[in-house]
Amino acid sequence: MNRDVEVAIELAVSAGKKILEIYDSKFEISLKEDKSPLTDADKAANRIIVEGLKKEFPDHAVLSEEMQDDLSRLESEYCWLVDPLDGTKEFINKNGEFTVNIALVKDGHPKIGVVYIPVTDELFFAKQGMGAFHRKKCVDQTISTSKRTSNLTILVSRSHRSEAVDRLIEQNRDKIGDVKEAGSSLKGCLIAKGDADVYYRFGPTREWDTAAMHCIVEEAGGIVNQIDDTRLIYNKRNTLNEKGFYVINRIENKLI
């Protein structure tokens, strides 16, 4: 395994273990400017990951949800995108569906993706051209998206479900067999693993929300695009993904 992948995995797991320590304690919750919640776990995980990346890759830029954006990253060939605790609402609600997301981007595209699920000690990771993998109990297995084109399992966000998604489900009842809720970037990983088939997000997200699972899904054979079918681009000046996006196992299952 390449050193860059190894470092990303080590830091994700280390951050995840720190998150679990705080998860099982009484933690502080505050609100950021956009009214989204922030906990001690977000800050502690961010510190572990960002310091580790800067030490190992001093020439690479880092963009994290929980740090001041340094636009000098736009001049860097490589940029790490970090969401130290994706699914803070899930963390606060103690449902276990939160993840640590780390991705390496070059030329606007994710080249490495690592998603760690602290509560179940599961890891999803991928590197462009090398495939996607799921690690559980220290065993790595290659994963791939399902081949289903009917009786589809569609995922909906546990915290961000919208009327647009409900309409989409209603309009495609003939194709959909099951609707499941899930939190954070776990949704993309479930599609990469073949456990689900379709996920649509119509609302805005940030680059660090999608980059890691984007790489994993594509290396598993799936498709990630913006709602208008254009490609998600990373390390932009404006980090907002304004158009929404979809994740599907096969092109035949594009629902709109």
Image: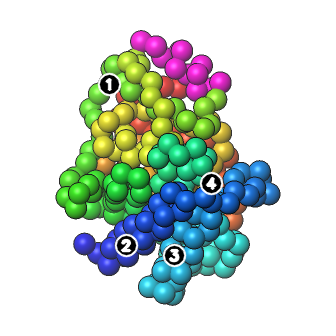
Mark with earlier residue (2, 3): 2
Residue situated in front as seen by the camera: 179 or 119: 119
Numbered label attached to residue 206: 4
Point out which mark residue 10 bears.
2
- SS of the residue at dot 4? strand
Mark 3, residue position: 48
Distance from label 1 to label 3 (Cα)? 42 Å
For residue 43, say whether it is visible. yes
User: Residue 108, can we see it?
Assistant: no
- Say which of marks 1 and 2 sits in front: 2
Indicate which disc, 4 or 3, sits on the residue closer to the N terminus. Answer: 3
Residue depicted at x 68% and y 60%: 28
- Find residue 149 and name its label: 1
Give the residue at x 62% y 65%. Answer: 40
Quarter holding the N terminus is bottom left
Q: Are marks 2 and 3 in contact (CB under 8 Å)?
A: no
Q: Amino acid at mark 3?
A: Ile
Say which label, 1 or 3, has the lower sequence index: 3
Quick one: label 4 or label 1, which is nearer the N terminus? 1
